[in-house]
Amino acid sequence: MARINSPKELEELRQKILSQRDPNKPCITLCSGTACHASGSENIAAIFLQELEKEGLKADVDFRRTGCHGFCERGPIVVIYPEEICYLQVQPEDVPEIISQTIKEKKVIDRLLYADPTTGEKVTYEPEIPFYKNQKQVVFGTNRRIDPTSIEDYLAIGGYRALAKALFEMTPEQVVNEVTKANLRGRGGGGFPTGRKWETTRDAPGEPKYVIVNADEGDPGAYMDRSLLEGNPHSVLEGLVIGAYAIGSHEGFIYVRQEYPLAVENVYIAIKQAEEYGLLGKNILGSGFDFTIDVHRGAGAFVSGESSALMTAIEGRVGEPRPKYIRTAVSGIWDKPSNLNNVETWANVPLIIDRGANWYTSIGTEGSKGTKIFSLVGKVNNTGLVEVPMGVTLREIIYNIGGGIPGGKKFKAVQTGGPSGGVIPEKYLDAPVDFDELTKLDSMMGSGGMIVMDEDTCVVDVARYFIDFLCDESCGKCVPCREGLKHMREILDDIVSGRGKPGDIELLEGISRIMARASLCALGQTAPNPVLTTIKYFRDEYEAHIEEKRCPALVCKDLISFYIDPSKCQACMICGRECPVGAISGGKGLVHIIDQDKCTRCGTCFDVCPARFSAVRKISGEPVPEAIPEAERVLARGK
Amino acid sequence: MSEVTFKIDGREIKAEAETTVLEAARSAGIDIPTLCYHPALTPFGACRLCVVEITSKGRKRIVTSCNYPVEEGLEVDTRSPDVIEIRKGIIEMLLARCPKVELLQDLAREYGVEEPRFKLGDEDERCILCGLCARMCEERMGASVINFVDRGVDRKVQTPFQVTGDKNLDMCRACGACAFVCPTGAIKLEDITTKEPVPIPSEFEEGLATRAPVYLPFAQAVPNAPVIDKEKCVHFTTGKCKTCEAFCAPKAIDFEQEDEIIEVDVGNIIIATGFDLFDPSVIQQYGYGRLDNVLTSLEFERTVSSAGPTEGHILLKDGSEPESIAIIHCVGSRDEQYHEYCSRVCCMYSMKFAHLIKEHTSADVYEFYIDIRSFGKGYEEFYNRMLEEETVFIRGKPAEVTDIAETPEEEGKLIVQFEDTLVGRQRRLPVDMVVLSCGIEPTKDVESIARLFNISRSADGFFLEKHPKLDPVATMTDGIFVAGCCQGPKDIPDTVAQASAAAAEALAMISRGKVEIEAATAMVNERLCTGCQLCKEICPYSAISFDEEKRVCNVNEALCKGCGACVGGCPSDAISLSHYTNEQILAQMEGALT
């Protein structure tokens, strides 16, 4: 690879790459994101290559492994260009058929297409699938068009054009002003204006200055940053170099979790390629600007996502937050000015520089501009990563993109912002999603986690889950967070296991008040949010647990019992066979009865009882009906 | 550094811009409670007890005062309702964690926190995870061997040795700084390290107490300023620490100071180098150093001193009070094996001990003596008073002190084996404590001092005065005087008298302003002198020096007494006495004979 020494050479290289590519040449792309990888895309890729070789199509058909497409529910995803025919849940045995039918015969394989769950109508082309149609993928969309390990792919779609523009057509001040004008806000959770942060670091005394990519995403169920870093690492690098130029930094860090092996690998590859092309290192693009990047692999602590803890970790110490009365932008790594933004924020930067702040501010709401990637998970039909403009309502995300709640269940609530966020109930489904609106609902945008819950979810149990998660993931440094979480967990454990006492709710609120105001870092300050919002919106459920010892959602094991309705039981013996503890008695023609003393409430009988009988019931807050007399157990089957 | 003006609890306060709210408040006498703060360590901000409510740029918020820097126009409320609510919450949480820690119980009382509403922790739990130990070990001691392990609710303090069980990883120096700084007594050194701590014995307290590496030698030390023991100080041994510097408000500690030799030109020198106490461990039969509760007189002196390590309580090693004490006189004195002379002070201080023992305890006192020498003014009367106070005086020097019991009554006691010479019988006396009245002997460096000043010593090793009766403070060298026990054993009145005399002699010379020198002094004929320096060795007055350049000897006429020793001793006949040259003597002889 030859070094690129000027913007002109960069454009020439881009044209050269494009000229070698025929837009009409068939190209099979296979999603190799983490979710599809887990569903076997690795194996499918090998079979594709093998088949192409066998059919002698290697020269005529391109094959590309791309980053995450977002529709993880239906992976592995195969998209065939130039038509953009999209096949979902492709299995190895489908590969020869795809090649023989679609590639050779140009025929669409109907069974691999997306089918509308209600109408059953098939959708052939990827952009027309409702999941994608209702999104606005400006940051994440490039993922599915490029191979993350190929810088040429990134260059072909206009990569590093923004960098050239910033370095040669703009002063650092103009870059900062553009980002400020675009009103880009931190995508990591806090929503702090990025331009202002950059300016603070640039104006802070002290050299060297550092810029950092926070890729320590750790919220349960969230994987936006991971997929972005895995699927399009160059967009993050480009944003970082532009930011470094604007701030006056010559050294950057990418703090990435060791648990993200593919992200780590792809980032290393990307850095190496960028260095070889002269897009990183000394005298970038011949501009005289120097910038190098170090990758720091995280040791697996959730709290290291907090900016001061992350910087402490980069210094080689245990990742624990430190007080930030002097901002890290002024005194960060080794007490030097350090600007930290998360992956998604950096990935937005090249777009703003390339297309301008005016374009950027045309997307989004008054206070929140641009798009946001959410990780839509939980009780929703289409789980995956979705990118929408700020201001789209929760309902649009969950129903139009997410396809609603599976199994015809009722929507109950959605948890946004991870363990620091809150639970939003149904009545706010039409609230627009942006930084300020979610905060008004006592939740937060966070890094973009969105966990959908249906009527079968117990909110007390959810709150307990998040508190339990934080008990393990808090660093334990400050008293309110460490001790507060411990006592919250004890109280919630008591409530879900039927030992709740009157006053427990008030005690939880009291602990929360202390934690929210006195904790050292945002982790502790926001840790009570899941508890506070569930109390606020679902206080009756807490009261049912405490006063009636009843779990309205029929989830909390210690508060529920399984009961076989004798009028429905057809004595099929399935539950009796499956019960792992032998708690079910009965036999052929004999109505089954659960021995409540033996029952461990695992729910197996409930799951295996044939739907047409539905004889097993969960009951809570009421005594289990007396077993019917032995004489009445004999089943009289109608002919 | 610039100064800023701001308000704490409505009071206007000025402070340097770099100080924290806590430091400024404390200097102004405003109390803010803390648990994880230490003036010598980086603020940690973990306990959150020091929270205050501030109004900065029109915005109210809660911050920790230990690490919030003061700023112009800041308003601080140290006891707002929110602050009190948070402190109460924190105290309640910590008390639930460590219910038996007094520090937290006191705080709970102060803030009106009643029984915690949460599940109580283990009664043995004392650690509040304030991190003082870890920061002290890392920031100041430079060892970094104690730190937090695990995270979240499982966080605890441990050392590598505790974690791995590998003793080779035990890099702890057993300095004890962690245990010292721990506010709740959660750290016991034996739990931290496999190593034994090495305490620094206090020289002044005869090793009965320990001291820190920075210390005041003793209460009346002159100058009355602390000193740093360079051999033990962590800063001088490892380059870290400097904790004392952080505490010293007047910034009086200077680590750059070096030992220096100061040369002073003087006309007179008074040598008052004192004495050493006889070391009784060489008398093995008395068991000093081997048997507990056998003490030297100086150790016992510190024990009975109200400013001493036990505040004047006479206690045995096990902490109990003795019921009987034997005091053995003439240990090392009047003994052909050690010192033949009488140390003069032992009889009287032994009787003083008897008196003090009677005053402090109800113990029986036995004085084993050879002769009672109560020679001074009022001394004999004191002896008689001791007899009245029922001190038992036994004439006879004990042969042995042992802990091997022969009868049940002797079990667990020290037995003094002696001959009562007044009765003429061998006896054994079981006691709880034995005090050895050790004698006075010349200091260990007496010989080098004598050589330095070229003064003589008598057979007992003490410095020799010019004349025992007629010139008892002068030495053979003019202008050098001796005073006190360096000249011979004596008690305090005698020492003071001799010191006064020496001072008077020196003053006499100073007021005269000049010295009379001998007319007949030795002269060196430089042409004949071979530079053998034999004369220099011979001269009793240190009057001869060697001229390195000319390679010949010179006579200092101010010091020369004209004794003629060098004249006779010079092998090359290069020295003659002025007015008494060989030629003059011969001429006189010739004249007399003709």
Image (cartoon, rainbow, N blue to C red):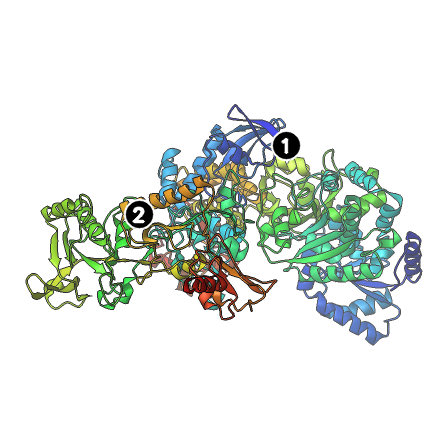
Is B435 on the left or on the right of B48, as rendered?
left
The local crowd at label 1, few if under 14, some if 14 to 19, many if 20 or more residues have their Cα within 10 Å, is few
Asked if A507 appears above or below B471 in the picture, the reply is above
Q: Quadrant of the N terminus of chain B?
A: top right
Query: At 78% across and 58% down in the image, what residue appears?
Result: A86
Residue found 91% across the figure and 52% down from its top: A7
Reading the image, the residue beneath label 1 is B2
Amino acid type at mark 1: Ser
Q: In the picture shown, does residue B127 fall above or below A79?
A: above
Separation (CA) of disc 1 from disc 2: 58 Å
Q: Position of residue A18 (x, y in %)?
A: 91, 58
Instruction: Tell me where residue B399 sits by quadrant.
Output: bottom left
Would you name the residue on which mark 2 appears?
B495
Residue A415 locus on image (x, y percent):
59, 44
Q: Secondary structure at mark 2?
A: helix
Q: Is residue B280 above or below residue B180?
A: below
| Direction from residue A469 to residue B118 in the image, left or right | left
Can you tell which mark lies on residue A366?
none
Point out the image quarter for the C terminus of chain B: bottom left
